[in-house]
Amino acid sequence: VSTVGAAGATGMAVGATGGAVAQAVARTDRKAPTPLSSVGSTRVPFHGKHQAGITTPLQAFGHLLAFDLVSGAGRKQAAKLLKRWSRTARELMAGESTADSTGIALDAGPSSLSVTFGFGRSFFSRTGLEKERPRELAPLPDFSGDALDKDLSNGDLWVQIGCNDGLVAFDALREIQRQADGTARLRWQMNGFTRTPGATKRPMTMRNLMGQVDGTNNPKRSEEDFDRRIFVPSSSSPAWMADGSYAVVRRIRMLLDTWDKESLSEQEKVIGRRKSDGAPLTGGTEDTDPDLEKRDADGSPAIAADAHVRVTAPATNGGAAMLRRPFSYHDGFRDDGAPDAGLLFIAWQADPQRGFVPVQRKLDRGDALSRFIRHEASGLFAVPGGPSKGEYVGQRLLE
Ligand code: HEM
């Protein structure tokens, strides 16, 4: 992550397309560059071994989009689209204006924008690339607690946008959507958010909409086996997925009316951590490991048998681990008055059969949290490695 000096300094090029919008941009452009804060000027690199948006610090705003290729569009059209999308992502992430800029993002700088691209299972049959389809994209099993909406699940192509400025995020979303025209149709969109970086003096683990500190025990980049758990090895098969990762996306609604009626101690029992600071119920601070062996005076486990942290801990799952990088969402209120809100759960791993699947199987059998959540949408996407200079995302698959 690096910073650029000022929005104007990176050159707000005006498109050759002309028109009222572009002219308005040109007028604004002639003004002195806007001085940026560190929030606005922070830039996430587009090129690299891995795509941005996986280990990038979580941004305040997120948009998830899935597209289906239109009939008649195949591999060639998909390659052209990925080329267009990659160029736009590169320019916007650098804080540059694109040829078709509408001016929405002027003045704000790149604001840590990241754009991440992935392929769903159906992409490979639509493009005649079945031979290149990774076995890791086998459909996720059905879980007994699932209440999935098929129209909000899966898709040929997946785009994740993260940004610390809502206007810059929307600008990227709009450009991506416009460029798909004629090649791919939007299948679903989900919008999320989390805490604004800089709102607290020191960086803190975010809270979800149940009020819990969420993300504490994520694998850390400093850990020796981090890369092996999260990224596909360089010598993988298929070769185009080298240094990529698999994203499991679940829209999980929280039954907040039920949850909010529970006592604090019951809420803490469900997770196995304190709500105030995220420390395990077995003592210490947020960073202390939960002691899964510890028993209370009456002999019962200090962290309940069905507590979420016990059921999900790698120690109780044969080492299964994933990097959770979720956004919260709120889509208004349902007819029954309950908030339509929860977690856009995104889990990254080198192999979902060794990450998400075994853990979710166990959660499905006995997680104290299940009473308070509903999995309503699901997707699994192959996210190739990051592009090198001059390359577009997915080029190793599509050419
Ligand atoms: C840990 C909340 C769904 C996997 C946690 C923690 C909270 C939490 C508060 C403890 C703090 C932390 O280490 O991050 C939730 C909520 C969910 C949800 C509110 C749904 C709305 C899931 C799902 C999975 C999962 C679907 C995977 C299938 C994990 C893992 C940990 C964890 C692996 C870390 C366990 C450890 O090593 O201590 N979750 N979670 N969670 N959760 Fe979830």
Image (cartoon, rainbow, N blue to C red):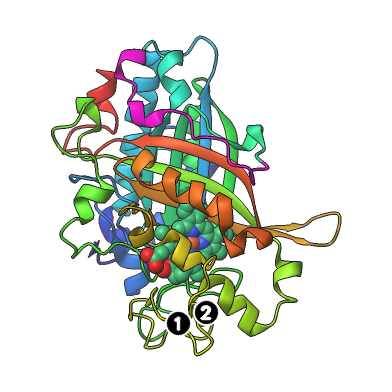
Residue 281: give x, y in percent of width and height.
Answer: 47, 83
Q: Which residue is mark 1?
A: 295
Q: Are marks 2 and 1 in contact (CB under 8 Å)?
A: yes
Looking at the image, residue 16 sits to the left or right of residue 394; the answer is right
> Considering depth in this image, is 397 or 342 the residue closer to the camera?
342
Between 314 and 259, the one lying in front of the other is: 314
- As drawn, 264 above or below 182: below
- Nearer the observer, 216 or 363: 363
Q: Amino acid at mark 2?
A: Ser
At 43% from the left and 54% from the top, the residue drawn is 162
Regarding residue 104, the answer to whether it shows in the image is no
Is residue 376 shown above or below 95? above
| Mark found first going from the N terminus, 2 or 1 | 1
Quadrant position of the C terminus in the picture: top left
Going by the image, does 48 lie left or right of 218? Answer: left
| 129 falls in the magenta region | no
Under tag 2, what secondary structure?
loop
* Local SS, label 1: loop
Location of residue 368 by image quarter: bottom right
Q: Residue at x 32, y 40 (%)?
A: 351
For residue 312, above or below residue 86: below
Question: Quadrant location of the N terminus?
Answer: bottom left
Disc 2/disc 1 C-alpha distance (Å): 5 Å
What residue does disc 2 label? 300
- The reply to whether the residue tagged 2 has its Cβ within 8 angstroms of ligand 1 is no
Q: Residue 64 placed where, x, y %? A: 51, 45
In the rendered image, residue 276, in percent from the top left (x then y), is placed at 52, 86
Residue furthest to the front: 299
| Closest to the observer, 302 or 376 | 302
Q: Looking at the picture, which amino acid does disc 1 mark?
A: Arg
| Residue range of the region highlighted in magenta in the rendering | 130-147
- Classified by dominant secondary structure, the portion drawn in magenta counts as loop
